[in-house]
Amino acid sequence: MTDWQNIATWRVLIVDDETANREVFAEMLQFFGAQVTMAANGLEALDHARQSPPTIILTDLAMPKMDGWQMLRSLRADPKLRHIPVL
């Protein structure tokens, strides 16, 4: 179970097609102790989430291959992933 008061227990998946955006968010979260995984689009994010479900997903909406909305619909359709909070 996730301890939302302790960021060191978080596994965060950052999804954005802009490398700089991913890196800025990752750096901030890692500074506070979160474990971070990154993906450049929704398809990559789904692969990461299926292999190692994150605690939370931070996503961009406008991305190539699969946008954030499509990714969210796919997550919500998967019984193993539908519980993951998405921002």
Image (tube, rainbow, N blue to C red):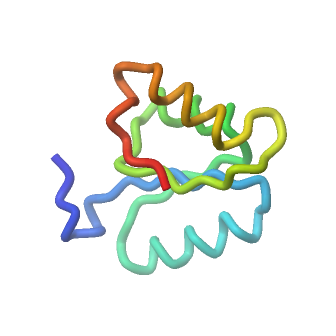
Residue visible at 67% across and 37% down in the picture: 42
Residue 55 vs 34, above or below: the answer is: above
Left or right, 64 with respect to 9, comes to right
Residue visible at 65% across and 32% down in the picture: 70
Depth check, front residue: 78 or 24: 78
Left or right, 12 with respect to 48, comes to left
Expressed as whole percent of the image width and height from the top left, the position of residue 22 reads 66, 64
Residue 49 vs 4, above or below: the answer is: above
Residue visible at 32% across and 58% down in the picture: 10
Depth check, front residue: 3 or 72: 72
Residue 80 vs 83, above or below: the answer is: above
Residue 34, quarter of picture: bottom left
Expressed as whole percent of the image width and height from the top left, the position of residue 59 reads 60, 53
Expressed as whole percent of the image width and height from the top left, the position of residue 74 reads 55, 25
Expressed as whole percent of the image width and height from the top left, the position of residue 23 reads 66, 69
Residue visible at 73% across and 40% down in the picture: 67
Residue 60, quarter of picture: bottom right
